[in-house]
């Protein structure tokens, strides 16, 4: 069963900047893939469209069985809350808020009560090896730890699809390896994961590579 | 697929978390609201306390006393009341007590060596023995005039008269109408009849005998049942001076106090206006803070959208933040205003009064301001596209 399905997707900004020029992509449930390409290739646009943060100019997008074109903004928000997890290059953690509450916020828009959110956040932090640092604030943690908190936040709701945008881009290689190890574990547990990267090494590490160049997927 | 609702506690948590991250800015912008609310509460509170004080005083003094003065003739000459006026007033049914004073053509001085022109504003008045009863007054020292002392060269001084003459005890003598009179009493203040406070009072008989008084009263005082005051007022001129009722002036001294109580609320409009301007400026401050906050937090907004927040949920987050911010200022302002009222009232010996409607109005005002100030920034935040918000570095 496919969890991501792009058909003839194009994205044009301001009427003349063609970020995507007709992309077809099918990803089956449980896959671990890298979307790789140099900057400006359109891979970030692809992530935004897969992540339903943006709509294509033309073509069809189906995520977890839902046709994105048929959903309004509220419904897309609900889709993101239930089916998608995001990990960003810059972590995007709330400063001054404990790791536990940062992760618990991953469930804020899913209608889960606060007590349950905190319980599941503690479990998610345990899963990324930070069970002993629940009360630490982001500024008391290393970059690798912060990114692991961000990963915990992305998966706290057990989304079937995890999108990671350059997850190791701001980390040294040791911390990066740590984050990749967690991603591997999540993949083995059944989560579909797409990593957007320009790093060949990470791409080779993934079972499947999707190469993007000039708005097109290379065969 | 429907998005989950954000529970009310979560809305507050999210709003408060935005404030917790920037405490200094929160305090400064809440201060603007606080100053406006404190000003308004203090203005209302202090004028209410002042009114309460006057009303209590009025309550204590009673509003059932009327005074009748001689007034002027149709030719503008000073008129005189008939000698028998007091007795006639006393015979009006609802009247419980009536008395009179008459101005004697004399002055009061400490000694004969003081120039006759130096009267210190003290008038010499003949008084009936019932005067103190009608005024519901009392003596601070000594005794009041009785039938016996009304025939003797004895004088009772009003509170201000005694103070101006420098007399603090009875038994001393004062120089009146070319001879010595002995001070036998000093009165307490009589707020309903301030002219009595500035008088040296002697009996009618002795005034006629020694001070050249003609026996015609100049002012009558009467008290009646509260509900009959208006009826008595209507018949007084005809009773006192049947021949020339038009020459008689009737007044109700408590009316002046009541007017003062009513006026206590009036002068505050300008100050209230000032408070409102301060509040408005505070509201602009909150709006400004919120706009800056939205600009700074584009990444947070993008993140929340990626976590599944709808536009409405982003809007409500910033709206609740703005509401909390101004409510914080409102509560602080209400407390400050109430403290200022209590402090001022205590220093003036007034009963401190902060009307609940003022507090309610202040809370309502801050909620309205918080909503208005937050509306535009919240809409801006909600309109941000998640991709734009996330790509900001």
Image (cartoon, coloured by chain):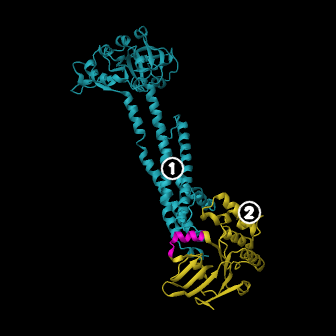
Chain colours: A yellow, B cyan
Q: Judge whether residue A98 can be spotted in this image.
A: no
Residue on which disc 1 sits: B363
Q: Mark 2 points at which residue?
A: A134
For the point 60% across and 68% down, the residue is A81
Magenta stretch, main secondary structure, is helix
Which residue corresponds to the image point at 45% horizontal and 17% vertical from the top-left? B156
| Residue at (51% x, 77% y) in the render | A69
Mark 2–mark 1 Cα distance, whole angstroms, equals 38 Å
User: Residue A93's x, y, as percent?
Assistant: 66, 69
In this view, the residue farthest toward the front is: A1
Mark 1, chain letter?
B
Residue in front for this viewpoint, A184 or B129: A184
Are both tags, 2 and 1, on one chain? no
Q: Is residue B359 magenta?
A: no
Q: In which quarter of the image is residue B51?
A: top left
Q: What stretch is highlighted in magenta?
A: A70-81
Answer left or right for B247 relative to B279.
left
Classify the position of the C terminus of chain B by image quarter.
bottom right
- Check the image and name the residue furthest to the bottom: A219
**Mark 2 Cα-neighbour bin, 10 Å: few <14, some 14–19, many ≥20:** some
Q: What element carries label 1?
A: helix
Between residue B34 and residue B379, name the one nearer to us.
B379
**Left or right of B80: which side holds B272?**
right
Q: How crowded is mark 1: few (under 14 residues within 10 Å), some or many (20 or more)?
A: many
Residue B273 x %, y %: 43, 50
In the picture as drawn, the residue positioned furthest to the top comes out as B148
Disc 2 and disc 1 in contact, CB within 8 angstroms: no
Residue B357 rendering spot, x and y as whole percentages: 47, 43
Total labels drawn:
2
Q: Residue A212: give x, y in percent of width and height.
A: 62, 88
């Amino acid at each position: 069963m496919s969890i991501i399905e792009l058909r003839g997707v194009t994205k044009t900004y301001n009427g003349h900047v063609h970020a995507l020029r007709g992309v077809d992509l099918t990803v089956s449930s449980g896959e671990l893939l890298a979307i790789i390409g140099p900057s400006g290739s359109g891979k970030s646009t692809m992530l935004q469209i897969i992540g339903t943060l943006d709509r294509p100019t033309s073509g069809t997008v189906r995520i977890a069985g839902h046709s994105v074109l048929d959903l309004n903004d509220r419904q897309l928000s609900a889709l993101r809350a239930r089916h998608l997890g995001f990990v960003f290059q810059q972590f995007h953690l709330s400063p001054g808020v404990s790791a536990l509450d940062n992760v618990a916020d991953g469930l804020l828009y899913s209608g889960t009560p606060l007590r349950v959110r905190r319980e599941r956040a503690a479990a998610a932090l345990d899963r990324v090896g930070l069970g002993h640092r629940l009360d630490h604030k982001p500024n008391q943690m290393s970059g690798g730890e912060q990114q692991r908190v961000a990963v915990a936040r992305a998966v706290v709701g057990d989304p079937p699809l995890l999108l990671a945008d350059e997850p190791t881009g701001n980390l040294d290689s040791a911390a990066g390896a740590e984050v990749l190890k967690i991603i591997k574990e999540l993949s083995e547990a059944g989560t579909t994961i797409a990593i957007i990267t320009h790093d060949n090494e990470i791409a080779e590490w993934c079972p499947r590579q999707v190469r993007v160049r000039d708005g097109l997927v290379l065969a | 697929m429907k998005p989950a609702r954000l529970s009310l506690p979560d809305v507050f948590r999210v709003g408060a978390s935005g404030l917790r991250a920037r405490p200094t800015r929160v305090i400064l912008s809440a201060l603007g609201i606080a100053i406006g609310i404190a000003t308004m509460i203090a203005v209302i509170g202090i004028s209410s306390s002042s009114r309460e004080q006057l009303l209590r005083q009025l309550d204590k003094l009673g509003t059932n006393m009327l005074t009748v003065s001689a007034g002027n003739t149709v030719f503008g000459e000073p008129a005189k009341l008939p000698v028998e006026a007091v007795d006639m007033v006393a015979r009006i049914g609802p009247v419980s007590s009536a008395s009179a004073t008459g101005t004697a053509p004399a002055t009061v001085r400490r000694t004969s060596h003081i120039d006759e022109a130096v009267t210190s504003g003290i008038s010499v008045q003949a008084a009936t023995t019932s005067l103190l009863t009608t005024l519901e007054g009392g003596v601070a020292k000594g005794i009041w005039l009785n039938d016996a002392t009304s025939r003797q060269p004895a004088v009772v001084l009003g509170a201000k008269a005694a103070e101006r003459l420098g007399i603090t005890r009875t038994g001393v003598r004062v120089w009146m109408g070319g001879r010595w009179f002995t001070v036998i009493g000093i009165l307490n203040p009589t707020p309903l009849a301030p002219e009595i406070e500035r008088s040296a009072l002697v009996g009618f008989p002795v005034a006629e005998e020694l001070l050249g008084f003609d026996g015609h009263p100049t002012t009558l005082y009467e008290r009646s049942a509260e509900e009959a005051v208006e009826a008595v007022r209507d018949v007084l001129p005809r009773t006192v001076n049947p021949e020339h009722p038009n020459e008689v002036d009737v007044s109700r001294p408590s009316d002046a106090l009541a007017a003062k109580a009513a006026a206590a609320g009036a002068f505050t409009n300008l100050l209230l206006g000032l408070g409102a301007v301060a509040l408005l400026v505070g509201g602009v401050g909150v709006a400004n803070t919120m706009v800056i906050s939205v600009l700074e937090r584009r990444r947070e907004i993008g993140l929340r959208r990626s976590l599944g927040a709808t536009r409405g949920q982003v809007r409500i987050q910033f709206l609740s933040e703005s509401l909390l911010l101004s409510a914080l200022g409102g509560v602080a302002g209400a407390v400050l205003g109430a403290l200022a009222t209590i402090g001022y009232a205590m220093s003036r010996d007034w009963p401190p009064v902060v009307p609940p409607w003022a507090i309610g109005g202040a809370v309502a005002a801050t909620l309205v301001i918080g909503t208005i100030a937050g509306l535009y920034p919240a809409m801006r935040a909600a309109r941000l596209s998640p991709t734009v918000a996330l790509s900001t570095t």
